[in-house]
Amino acid sequence: MHIFYTPDIHSQTSSHTLPEEESKHCVRVMRLTTSDRIMLIDGRGGRYIAEIVDPHPKHTLLNIVSFSQDEPRQGKIHLVVAPTKNIDRYEWFLEKATEIGLDEITPIICEHSERKAVKLDRLAKVLIAAMKQSKQSFLPQLNQVTKLSDFLNTETSDKCFIAHCEEDSKSYINEKLSAGENAMILIGPEGDFSSQEIAIALDKGYVPISLGSSRLRTETAAVVACIEVALINR
Amino acid sequence: MHIFYTPDIHSQTSSHTLPEEESKHCVRVMRLTTSDRIMLIDGRGGRYIAEIVDPHPKHTLLNIVSFSQDEPRQGKIHLVVAPTKNIDRYEWFLEKATEIGLDEITPIICEHSERKAVKLDRLAKVLIAAMKQSKQSFLPQLNQVTKLSDFLNTETSDKCFIAHCEEDSKSYINEKLSAGENAMILIGPEGDFSSQEIAIALDKGYVPISLGSSRLRTETAAVVACIEVALINR
């Protein structure tokens, strides 16, 4: 069944009108018509079966037939990753992490970051497309771009990890994280974190982790970390 | 130290001349000159420290200073993956799998494959670039494109797995594979394997595996499988 992302509906909604772009996609592209059924997801775990009442290319009217709420994932993962110089690699990571299971993402700017800005609306589109494509109902939370120095001052109850590349006695995530525990993982830019950034994170109680012996690109490290947490909670 | 891929040298080589393209890269792009040192890798685990004797843009002469042989990875992984419709996704998977740890790759053509051909030389370039970038010394073996029906008739001593999407009682790789064991994993095209292909594979003793509850794209499934095996052997 075709899936549409409709963040503005809720469990009590009985009828809904698709906005112009999605109405056009529904009627002109997918050629759906009266009494055809589609699935709506609200990005918060809600799934709605909807029946087309009026297949209009600009404002298709739907009747909500049923609603179900997916259980939120246990053991959430918040990835705090420096945007890559080539933003395609970052968008690729967002797509993959969403497919695998991502709850929250914060782009951070570090001392060695070559890229200091990202287009959040563009990243949001990637997350939505990946959520729909992988038939999930929870949209990862995309946070504002934040300076690492500021981010390290925020409070969290998550287990905090930092995947830096300097020589250090590191653990593997599965040695420090149990199923059901929330994880927050810092991944640095191409030039890695600065020694000072690492020192501050360790001082804040971040646990240094190794993602394996091979040297991984930023976006690869982020996906490996995401998969490791997913495996712990599988 | 800058790394060059030189498959034609061996442990006894005392001097070597870089071919035109790499000589140009070495002298014109990297601006290296007499007595500068570079690392040569042969793709078979051999690492060579070489000193530039004659920095010529077309035939740079090197003196091999030292040689060391890396230990081959224990618990090899052979990924047998249907090329994706969009070949960029396949090349992305090859890059990531090489970074993480890939030993052998066979592109397979299945009943539901939309893409029936790939440019092997282009895929080889991706593998070489990823090997150099991740500072590894073993180049994954790239096999000819093979029909799945033919591939399933080949003999192997590897533990064989198939990651299909049909409902089935599946295991996780780490329930069926121990550290040090070689794994061969089949990943199907966008349309999944056909029921007949799955039946034949199971009949041949392939173990059906699950890569998690979420629906993964072909290239994502291949990377997840690669990481799972890497974690088992970590």
Image (cartoon, coloured by chain):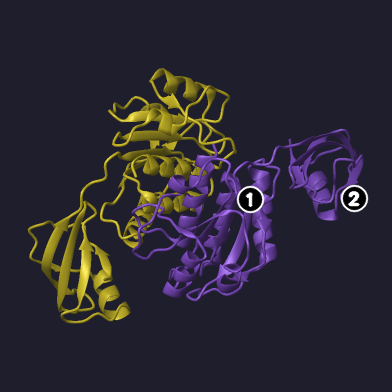
Chain colours: A purple, B yellow
Do badges 1 and 2 share one subunit?
A: yes
Amino acid on which the number 1 mark rests in the picture: Asp
The percent coordinates of residue B208 (x first, y second) are 46, 26
**Cα–Cα span, label 1 and label 2:** 32 Å
Disc 2 marks which residue? A59
Which residue does the image show at 81% across and 54% down from the upper left?
Answer: A21
Which of the labelled discs sits on residue B168, or is there none? none
| Residue A160 higher or lower than B72, as above or below | below
Viewport quadrant of the N terminus of chain B: bottom left
Q: Can I make out residue B123 in this image? A: no
Q: Nearer the viewer, residue B164 or B179?
A: B179
Amino acid on which the number 2 mark rests in the picture: His
| Residue A74 higher or lower than B49, as above or below | above
Which residue does the image show at 16% across and 69% down from the upper left?
Answer: B50
Disc 1 marks which residue? A103
Which residue does the image show at 47% across and 65% down from the upper left?
Answer: A202
The percent coordinates of residue A203 (x first, y second) are 48, 67
The total number of labels drawn is 2
Callout 1: few (<14), some (14-19), or many (20+) C-alpha neighbours within 10 Å?
some
Q: Nearer the viewer, residue A150 or A92?
A: A150
State which tag comes first along the sequence, 1 or 2. Answer: 2
Q: Can I make out residue A156 in this image? A: yes
Of the two numbered discs 1 and 2 in the rendering, the one whose residue sits closer to the viewer: 1
